Amino acid sequence: MNEEEKRTGAERTQPRFDLGESVAKLTDVSLVYHGIKQETEAVRNCSFEVKKGEFTALVGPSGCGKTSVLSMLAGIVKPSSGSVLVSGKPPDPRDNLTGYMLQRDHLLDWRTIEDNVLLGLEVKGLLSDETRAYALELLDKCALSAFARHYPRQLSGGMRQKAALVRTLAFSPELLLLDEPFSALDYQTRLLLSGEVHSIIKRGGYTAVLVTHDISEAIAMSDRIIVFSSRPAHVRREIEVGLSGGPMERRASPGFNDYFDLVWSELEGGKGDAH
């Protein structure tokens, strides 16, 4: 058996992306949290790049530093060393270049869905007739326009998360950051919503980075998977996903299990990484 035959289907099948310029780039980034009694090294010499229009998933052991990487991309946390760039400059939350969607929707119970969706624009001083119209258009695309005057308590968990996504996309961020946005949902809702979110992001041409513990979710949604080591996080491997279609079609693909095995082997191999 030659070397080509020995490779898994996931390793043989590589997509041919027609992606644009770099939207986000980390170069030799390290992050150390300073406590009263000790220091914690969360990230060490981490480097990767995200191209315009790309959907990238970050996977790694629990507590390895994935969310810390998102926080640096959002400009919430500054790296201890190295370079983090979004649209060619260090990220700053005030620049409105990144949108951050969390595990919980954090909708305000006393505001209607429409008012919740517009809240980010209000806070950022970006609310206008044009941005309001765009936000309402997104609500319609997410099949939520009929619920615009409802309150969060009147919506299901999946609908609330879609409203949170609209709120995040309303100011057209250059980079969308998703921190396990489906983890609080039941499995069926999670599958359905991941398909809807993937479709919205791809149709809208957004650039997205997803943090997830779910290997299957990463394969089903992303163009590329970045596998992190245990803490302090560094990139063990980047895997391009050569599957077509939406998340459900990908899950049914003959090559899906090959990708799962490949990612799993990298995670297993990273257990011995030095802390």
Image: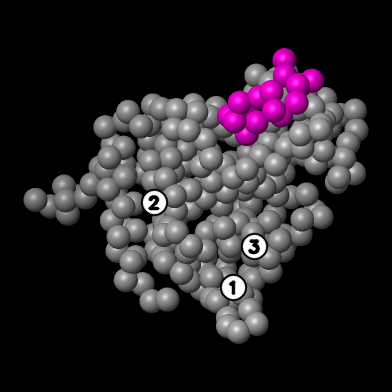
Q: Secondary structure at mark 1?
A: strand
Q: CA distance from mark 1 to mark 2?
A: 24 Å
By secondary structure, the bulk of the magenta-drawn segment is best described as helix
Residue 1's spot in the image, x, y percent? 9, 50
> What residue is shown with label 2?
239
Q: Nearer the viewer, residue 275 or 57?
A: 275
Q: What's the residue at 79%, 20% (across, down)?
A: 149
The reply to whether residue 47 is in sight is: yes
Residue 91's spot in the image, x, y percent? 72, 60
Are dots 1 and 3 in contact, CB under 8 Å?
A: yes
Residue 255's spot in the image, x, y percent? 28, 37
| Image side of residue 179 versus residue 164, left or right | left
Within 10 angstroms of label 2, few (less than 14), some, or many (20 or more) residues? some
Vertically, is 239 above or below 184?
Answer: below
Amino acid type at image mark 3: Met
Of the residues under marks 1 and 2, which one precedes in the sequence?
A: 1
Q: How many marks?
A: 3
Q: Nearer the viewer, mark 1 or mark 2?
A: 1
The structure's colour scheme is one colour
Q: CA distance from mark 3 to mark 2?
A: 22 Å
Disc number for residue 31: 1
Disc number for residue 72: 3
The quarter of the picture where the C terminus appears is bottom left
The reply to whether residue 199 is in sight is: no
Which region is colored magenta?
146-161
Q: Nearer the viewer, residue 125 or 45?
A: 125
Of the residues under marks 1 and 3, which one precedes in the sequence?
A: 1
